Amino acid sequence: MPEPLPPLEGYTFEGYRNADGSVGTKNLLGITTSVHCVAGVVDYVVKIIERDLLPNYPNVDGVVGLNHLYGCGVAINAPAAVVPIRTIHNIALNPNFGGEVMVIGLGCEKLQPERLLQGTEDVKSIPVDSASIVSLQDEKHVGFKSMVDDILQVAERHLAKLNQRQRETCRPLSWWSGCSAAAATPFQA
């Protein structure tokens, strides 16, 4: 393993600092799914959020639907199931989402949102309150419009929090963090 390079000096970027110490280069609302069955609903809602809600939140750069192809039949207790769980979980931890995790599920899937967020042995859990999880099979929903309205209400709460974030000057701690488009970088104040 090569020795780490010394910290970059004299370079900065404007980023969004997160509570966990990471820094994002964007300020995005990420909406992840716990099962592929809800991907169409998430895509539909993302378009509504972009058109109707985002103009009210000028400090939010956009919204991203984080869909995947895992269905309700995934053998979630199998040893290899840690791969999809860890993958979806780590995508939700992207520093560009500012810690505002929102999950849409169907309600009958084996990979329940709560399990998705608790992580694995080598991946930290994501603290999310139940108000950030929307189950489309919730008995309070009386049709498609009710489901969409519920998702939009949760999205607005997250957008309001993200809209409070401000860019600040950050210094990359390595040559790679200064080049990385993902900007999952540590920083120095």
Image (cartoon, helix red, strand yellow):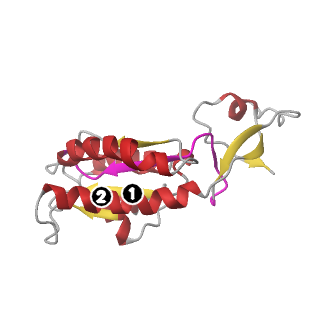
Taking depth in this image into account, of 161 and 57 the one nearest to the observer is 57
**What range of the chain is rendered magenta?**
19-36
Horizontal and vertical percent position of residue 72: 16, 51
- The residue positioned 78% from the left and 44% from the top of the image is 169
Q: What percent of the width, then of the height, locates residue 24?
A: 61, 44
| Residues at discs 1 and 2 in contact (Cβ within 8 Å) | yes
Reply above or below: 106 against 131.
above
- Label 1 and label 2: CA atoms lie apart by 6 Å
Tell me if residue 30 comes above or below residue 108 in the rendering. Answer: above
Residue type at the position of mark 2: Ile
Residue topped by disc 1: 155
Using residue 149 as the reference point, say whether residue 164 is left or right of it: right
Instruction: Kindly state the secondary structure of the residue where label 2 is placed.
Output: helix
Q: Nearer the viewer, residue 153 or 128?
A: 153
Left or right of 144 on screen, residue 65: right
At 67% across and 55% down in the image, what residue appears?
A: 21
List the single residue furthest toward the right: 10
The answer to whether residue 44 is magenta is no
* Type of amino acid under label 1: Ala
Rendered-image quadrant of the N terminus = top right
Above or below, 129 relative to 86: below
Rendered location of residue 132, percent (x, y): 37, 64
Which disc number belongs to residue 32?
none
Q: In which quarter of the image is residue 69?
A: top left
Tag count in the figure?
2
Query: x and y percent of residue 143 in the render?
Result: 11, 60
Q: Using the rendered image of the protein, determine whether residue 70 is visible from the camera's viewpoint.
A: no
Where, by quadrant of the figure, is residue 176 drawn?
top right
Which residue corresponds to the image point at 24% horizontal and 52% vertical from the top-left? 78
Mark 2 is surrounded, within 10 Å at the Cα level, by few (under 14), some (14 to 19) or many (20 or more) other residues, namely many
Q: Is mark 1 on a helix, strand or loop?
A: helix
Q: Which circle marks residue 151 in the picture?
A: 2
